[in-house]
Amino acid sequence: MEVKQQEQENIYLFVPNIIGYARIVLAIVSFYYMPTDYVIASWCYIISVLLDALDGHAARHFNQSTKFGAMLDQLTDRCGTCGLLVTLSYFYPKYMFWFQLSMAIDVACHWFYLHTTVLQGKTSHKFIDMSGNPIMRVYYTNRTVLGFMCLFNELFYAALYLLHFTPGPLLLGFSTFKLLAIVSFPVAVVKTGISVIHGFVASCNIGVIDVAERAAQREREANKKPQ
């Protein structure tokens, strides 16, 4: 009997993933100009952040959600923020340690979280679920809250970047960029705290997988032994 092969989808050319590639190009251009031209760097960075919101809508609209797209989106976010934090470390060497710490937490915790999410889809173990916590439940399920947290986190670092070049428009004699940095700072701290929680829970869940796999391996080895 002749087997008809279905045409394989090229997920790399899905609309949200093409948007992701555009974000990468914009991020690279932004990195290049960050030390010298804050206008070009800022616009490229802002457009990349705005496209971050667009690719999610595109994925849902075209029914093109993929694991590759989710990974691409998260990695672009993390790399974009890291590039900005590297520049801030150069502009504000006194606070380099805190920028380094922020980068380490952001990358490590999100990597743990993403990797555990992939592993959870392949297993049937009982994992730690933070959705029972009211704060985390709101963070996970309310897109407005999540968008607010992400926006103000970006605003904090962006405001610090712009302050290196200009105070921006003055509001009652006070720098608007400095005001933005002050207002958004607590949100950035809270978001970092949530990232730490993500990393801790993901680490615990990976531990659950390890314990279960080791137990299964011991059982297989025991079954192989001659009775």
Image (cartoon, helix red, strand yellow):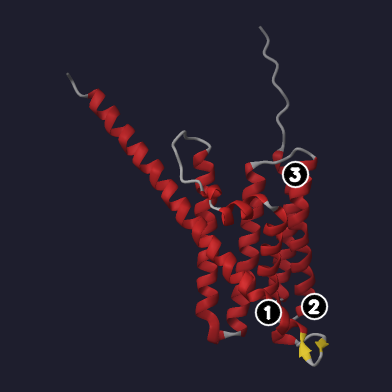
Spot occupied by residue 140 in the image (x, y as percentages of width and height):
62, 51
Label 1 element class? helix
Spot occupied by residue 135 in the image (x, y as percentages of width and height):
58, 57
Of 199 and 145, nearer the camera is 145
x 39%, y 47%: residue: 207
Q: Furthest-top residue in view?
A: 1
Q: The residue under label 2 is which amino acid type?
A: Val
Q: Give the tally of numbered discs.
A: 3
Of 199 and 52, nearer the camera is 199
Label 3 element class? helix
Residue bearing mark 3: 59
Label 2 element class? helix
- Tell me whether circle 3 and circle 1 mark residues in contact (CB < 8 Å): no
Of 183 and 225, nearer the camera is 183
- Quarter of the C terminus within the rendering: top left
Q: Is residue 197 above or below residue 35?
A: above
- Is disc 3 surrounded by few (<14), some (14 to 19) or many (20+) residues within 10 Å? some
x 75%, y 64%: residue: 26
Q: Is residue 84 above or below residue 195?
A: below
Spot occupied by residue 165 in the image (x, y as percentages of width and height):
73, 86
State the separation of the CA atoms marked 2 and 1. 18 Å
Task: Tell me: 151 left or right of 105.
Answer: right
Q: Residue 181 has which mark?
A: 1
Q: Residue 39 has which mark?
A: 2
Spot occupied by residue 53 in the image (x, y as percentages of width and height):
75, 55
Q: Furthest-left residue in view?
A: 227
State the separation of the CA atoms marked 3 and 1. 32 Å
- Is disc 2 surrounded by few (<14), some (14 to 19) or many (20+) residues within 10 Å? some
